Amino acid sequence: MSDPTVNGPAARSRGQVCLVGAGPGSADLITMRGARRLAEADLVLYDALASEEMRVYAPAARWFFVGKRACRQSIAQDVLNRLLIKHARRGLKVVRLKCGDPFVFGRGGEEALALARAGVPFEIVPGVSTAVAAPALAGIPVTHRGLASSFLVVTGHHEATYGPILDGLPPGSATLVVMMGLGQRARIAERLAARGWSAETPAAVVVGAATPQSWRWLGTLGALGAAEIPAASSGAPGMLVIGAVVGLAAELASGLSSDLASANVEEIKERNQL
């Protein structure tokens, strides 16, 4: 006998979950659809990297922090999945607000699977991935004709995961983007050098993306391990970018606007007709 709570009238009367990509941090870099879903939300479950400035889009919703940060106590993923299911079944419109894109190192796939298996309707709203947005905001194109025709994105959490990938990457063959890799920067630089990458390969540390904590360091692979992050940006998420394209950042700096990291919240309030 089928379960009426999954496929019957009860299912149709439930609320819905929307997995929304918040983009790289600034409130004006979320997509229009993402902003509309926030305006419609009863409850917003947001992570540690989603800008709280985005509350202007959902002033009537309840906001609940469910973020995960390295080396800090955080809510377990299975508990978060159950929260999404529980509140949707109570008829609420729930937004799960994630930094960047939900499906790029955001565990959005795990949450979508949990919702599908529970019979809870959901929507996915892609976001601007920090994998390409953070380098772009720092003046680094991840591809550029004559310098890089491809780019590789890996997570720097565990060497057992990224190590074999780096070992198989021919020196200088692609732009390498290492998300969540600040703590591993010395080891990553050593590993690439051991595989034949030149110590003079341009390299960057990009921290904070489009947030008030944004900061970048430009140098070489040989100096990457010793790069020091200022205290004002030490708690912000960051990434490494390694490859010839990083060398363009210094040239682009003369014309690059310096205020891209912060949204004008008052302006957003004025034009928000959602």
Image: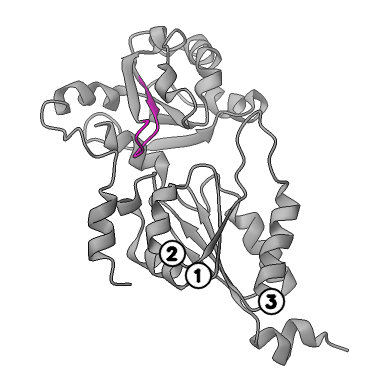
Name the residue at the bottom extreme. Answer: 9
How busy is the neighbourhood of tag 2: few (under 14 within 10 Å), some, or many (20 plus)? many
Based on the picture, tell me whether residue 211 belongs to the magenta stretch: yes
Using the numbered discs, state the Cα–Cα distance from disc 2 to disc 1 in whole angstroms: 7 Å
| SS type, badge 1 | loop
Above or below, 28 against 148 in this view is: below
Where residue 25 appears, as percent x and y from the top left, is 39, 44
Residue lying at 54% horizontally and 42% vertically, measured from the top left = 48
Residue lying at 21% horizontally and 25% vertically, measured from the top left = 248
**Sequence-earlier tag: 2 or 1:** 1
Instruction: State the extent of the magenta-drawn residues as a range.
Output: 204-213
Above or below, 72 against 47 in this view is: above
How busy is the neighbourhood of tag 3: few (under 14 within 10 Å), some, or many (20 plus)? few
| Closer to us: 8 or 241 | 8
**Sequence-earlier tag: 1 or 3:** 1
**Type of amino acid at the residue the image marks with label 1:** Ala
User: CB of mark 2 within 8 Å of CB of mark 3?
Assistant: no
Where residue 87 appears, as percent x and y from the top left, is 67, 69
Based on the picture, tell me whether residue 108 belongs to the magenta stretch: no
> Residue 161, located in which quarter of the rendered image?
top right
Badge 1 is on which residue?
41
Where residue 181 appears, as percent x and y from the top left, is 52, 26
Say whether residue 142 is visible: no
Badge 3 is on which residue?
90
| SS type, badge 2 | loop
Using the numbered discs, state the Cα–Cα distance from disc 2 to disc 3 in whole angstroms: 19 Å
Say whether residue 26 is visible: yes
Residue lying at 42% horizontally and 29% vertically, measured from the top left = 176
Badge 2 is on which residue?
58
User: CB of mark 2 within 8 Å of CB of mark 1?
Assistant: yes
**Type of amino acid at the residue the image marks with label 2:** Ala
